[in-house]
Image: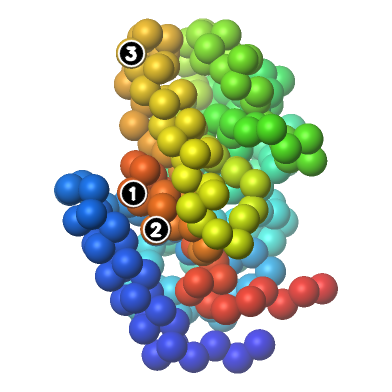
Amino acid sequence: MTYNEKAIKERLLQIKKNIIDAMERVERKNPPKIVAVTKTHPPELLNIIKEIGIEDVGENYVQEMLYKMQLHPELNWHFIGNLQRNKVKYIVGRVCLIHGVSSLKLVEEIDKRAKVLGITQNVLLQINQGEESKGGLKKEELEIFVKELNRFDNVCLKGLMALPPYYEDPEKVRPFFVEIKELLENINRKNLYKARLTELSMGMSGDYVVAVEEGSTILRIGTALFGERVKN
């Protein structure tokens, strides 16, 4: 696949304009962070990312991310996929944020590895919003789970991650974003965690405008920036 730097830069400018327009509609001041999702794209794409000013990159597969990381350790790496416990040791301390945590056993492994390194690893909790095929915590489990996280010294919960059902019409996704934001606000209101949660990782290529309107702080954007992924 050949990448056109000019075209990608133009797409990025359009995405930023759409974000600004969405912020103005809801009188929002602080823009969300754009995480460029580069899974299955070749490492050459990272050179373009740097050139056009993107600093945050998201990967779904540990092995692919580690290879790209060696080439561009200066980027801010986000792990946004399903993390297996036996892969934790490879990424703790090397990624700025793990987005999709949803089990205490995984948290225990992250905490153990982070303790060895003498660091604190930032994480988000992934919420399951009713799709059996997707992972994540059930809403009714969330409060108890968050309370449990207070005992870990080397894991820091920063917020929640949404993975809502896919709809052609992004307006149909809005209620799911509203729900995630309400869950985060409820955690803060009840002081369930030792630190205030501030991050909402929600919104992808097809629905990021609605996500911005509903308070997303992290957008995970791939196709809208780079075009369709190469399918193996």
Mark linked to residue 213: 1
The secondary element bearing badge 3 is classed as: helix
Q: What is the distance, in whole Å, between disc 3 and disc 2 at their CAs?
A: 27 Å
Task: Left or right? Give the position of 111 relative to 31.
Answer: right
Residue projecting furthest to the right: 232
Q: Residue at x 31, y 61 (%)?
A: 19
User: Compared with residue 85, is residue 232 higher up or lower down, i.e. above or below?
Assistant: below
Q: What is the distance, in whole Å, between disc 2 and disc 1 at their CAs?
A: 6 Å
| Occupied quadrant, residue 74 | bottom left
The secondary element bearing badge 1 is classed as: helix
Where's residue 156, x and y in %?
Answer: 45, 25
User: Compared with residue 197, is residue 11 higher up or lower down, i.e. above or below?
Assistant: below
Q: Are marks 3 and 2 in contact (CB under 8 Å)?
A: no
Q: What is the distance, in whole Å, between disc 3 and disc 1 at their CAs?
A: 21 Å
- According to the picture, the residue beneath numbered tag 2 turns out to be 209
Q: Nearer the viewer, residue 47 or 10?
A: 10
Where's residue 102, x and y in %?
Answer: 65, 28
Where's residue 99, x and y in %?
Answer: 55, 40
- According to the picture, the residue beneath numbered tag 3 turns out to be 189
In the rendered image, the quadrant that contains the N terminus is: bottom right
Q: Give, as a three-letter code, the residue at label 1.
A: Glu
